[in-house]
Image (cartoon, rainbow, N blue to C red):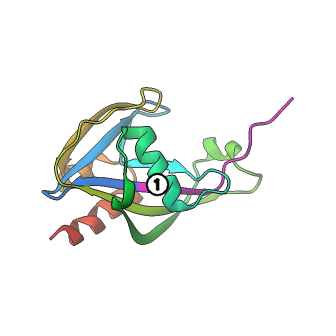
Amino acid sequence: MSRLPRKRPQSVLVVICTRGGEFLMLRRARPLAFWQSVTGSLDAGESPRQAAAREVYEETGLRAGGRLIDLHQSALFPIVRAWRKRYAPNVCFNREYWFALVLETRRLVRLNPREHLEYRWVPASAAARLTASWTNRDAIRALVGTLG
């Protein structure tokens, strides 16, 4: 029986917003229908920046190009027990690297229906309330401070 490759315990979080302070939030399809920014695991041999650009395109259809901003922050969080089987034995924590993509105006988003059900452009305060993830909330708040 062949096994799927183990996931790296490293991921990216990409907060997408407009210069006017509207934040893109995506509602996951599964396992739970919660709201989040763009997220995803690093593939083998991939840098956090490469993963961030890839995930933005896969989840929204947007091309980040040179506009991807490294927030130079990361968070370490425990991997949910039900998902630990995707990782090597005894791996219990994930390192999440934070990025931002600041757009001039809202864009139409092309969702991957296997990953997300819908999207909304909302003010920062609503985005922070929508997400269930403390890392996502902290990244949104960190980005708000740079928008002026």
Q: Which percent across, then down, holds residue 12?
A: 48, 56
Q: Quadrant of residue 101?
A: bottom left
Amino acid beneath label 1: Ala
Q: What residue sits 61% from the left and 56% below the top?
A: 46
Left or right: 96 as drawn, with respect to 138: right
For residue 115, above or below residue 86: above
Question: Quick check: can you spot residue 134?
Answer: no
Q: Residue furthest front?
A: 66
Which quarter of the figure is the N terminus placed in? top right
In the image, residue 10 lies in the stretch drawn in magenta: yes
Which quarter of the figure is the C terminus placed in? bottom left
Q: What residue sits 36% from the left and 48% below the top?
A: 37
Question: Quick check: can you spot residue 83?
Answer: yes
Helix, strand or loop for disc 1: helix
For residue 74, above or below residue 104: below
10 Å crowding of disc 1: few (<14), some (14-19), many (20+): many
| Most common SS among magenta residues | loop
Of residues 99 and 94, which is closer to you in this image? 99
Q: Label 1 belongs to which residue? A: 52
Q: Which percent across, then down, holds residue 103?
A: 23, 54
Which segment is the magenta one? 1-13
Left or right: 111 as drawn, with respect to 88: left
Q: What residue sits 40% from the left and 62% below the top?
A: 99
